[in-house]
Amino acid sequence: MSDAQAVILAGGKGTRLRPVTVGLPKPLVPVANRPLILHQLRHLAAHGIRDVALALGYAADRFADIAEQGGELGLNVRVITEPAPLGTGGALRWCADAGAFDPDRPLLWMNGDVVASPDIAALERFHRSRGALVTFWLTSQRDVTQFGVLELDGEGFVERFVEKPGPEETTSHLVNAGILMLAPRVLRRIPPDTFFSFEQQLLPLMVREREPIYGRFDGGYWLDTGNPRAYLAANRHVLEGRVDWEPAGRSNTPGLWVGAGAEARERGIIKPAAIGAGSVVEEGAQLFGRTVLGEGVRVRSGARLENCVLFDGVEVGHDADVYGSVVCADGRIGDACTLDRSIVGARASVGAGNELRGTRLWNDVELGSGVLVVDEGRA
C-alpha cells in the first residue's frame, strides 16, 4: 500500500468538448461506459492509494455518486467544492485549508480530464529518493507548443520550465501531463481564497530558484481528452487495451463487453466493442468495431456504426450510418441518416434522411426530416 494521498482536480468545464460537456462535467464524461473519474479512482485503488480528495467546481452536484463508488473500491474519498473558480493552485490551497491533506505525506495531484496509467509506486520512490518538493510524471509529445515543457538534467532535475514554447524555444519533448507528486507544505506558498495558477505563477519561480523540482518519464500511457477526436481515441484505446482501464460490462468474448440485459448478436459485431446494460442491437444492424453503446441504447436494423460513442438512451434509426461521432444522452438519429465526425448533443433529434458531416449539434435541437448537409460552424 502506498503512503501517498491523492487529489483529483475536477472543477473544469471542458469547453473544447462541447456540447458533450454542456451540463456534464468533463470528468464525468463516459469512457468505455465508465465515468472518466471513476476509471481514475479505480487506477488509484489498484496502485495502493487509499485517501483521495476530489476538488470540484462546475456542476459539483453531478458527482453525488462518485464518492460512494470510490468507497466501494476501498477508497476514503473526501469531496471539496470551490466557492468560485480558483485555478489549479487556488483549488489545491482551498483543499489544504479544508484539511483534506495530511501535511506529512506525499500528495499525488491528477487532473480530472486525462486518461493515463502512471506507475504511482515508482513515482513515489523517485520523489522520495530525490528529496523533491515537486516531481512531475511526464509524457512525451512531438508537438509541444500547447504544453508546459520541462528540460531535465541526467538525474531528472528540472533545469528549465517553458509554458507553450515556440518551435525554436526548446529541444525537449517532455511535457507536464497533469500528474505530479508534491510535498503538501508547498501549498502554503499559494495565497488563500485567490485565483492562482500553480503552473504559471509558482512553478516558474521555484525552477528559477533551483529548488528540488524533478521530472520522471516512464513511457506510460497518457491522453488529454480535450477535443472530440481525442475523446474518441480514448474510448478506442481502452477497448484495445492500450491503457490499463477496464470497460464496463462482462467480457465472455475477448474484445467485447456486454452489460446486463443487453441484446445483440455477436455475428453482427466486429470487435472491440462495448454494449451497455439494457441496450438492443437489432437483427441486421452492424457494429464495425471501436464502438461504445451506453445503457438503454437501441440500434435499429440496417444501421451501421463504427468508431463512435453513444451515450445512455440513444436511438439510431433503420439504415443510419454513424461514423467517428458522439451522440449524447437521449439523442435521436432518424432512419437513413448519415453522421460523419459529428457530435449530437443531449436530447437532440436528427430527422430521417439528414446528413451531418463535421458538425456539432447542440442540446435539445431538432432537425426536421429531409436531406440536409450541415457543415461545421453552421449548426
Image (tube, rainbow, N blue to C red):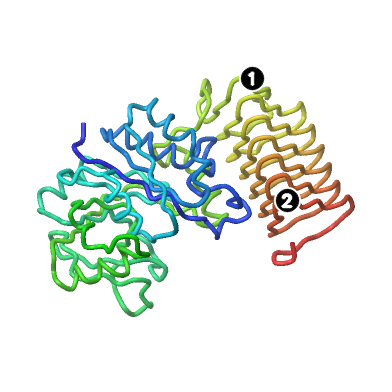
Residue at point 75%, 45% (across, down) = 321
Q: Tell which circle, 1 or 2, labels the residue nearer the N-terminal end.
A: 1
Name the side, left or right, on which 185 lies relative to 100. left
* x and y percentages locating residue 324 in the rendered image: 64, 50
Total number of numbered labels? 2
* x and y percentages locating residue 155 in the rendered image: 12, 59
Mark 1–mark 2 CB contact (< 8 Å): no
Q: Relative to residue 379, is residue 311 depicted above or below? A: above
Q: Which mark is residue 261?
A: 1
Residue type, label 2: Leu
* x and y percentages locating residue 77 in the rendered image: 35, 35
Q: Relative to residue 101, is residue 14 depicted above or below? A: below
- If the image is split into quadrants, where does the C terminus sit? bottom right
Name the side, left or right, on which 101 lies relative to 38. left
Dot 1 falls on a residue whose secondary structure is loop
Residue at point 57%, 56% (across, down) = 17
Callout 1 crowding tier (Cα within 10 Å): few <14, some 14–19, many ≥20: few
Q: Which mark is residue 316?
A: none
- Return the residue at label 2: 339
Q: CA distance from mark 1 to mark 2?
A: 27 Å
Q: Nearer the viewer, residue 186 or 30?
A: 186
Q: Quadrant of residue 1?
A: top left
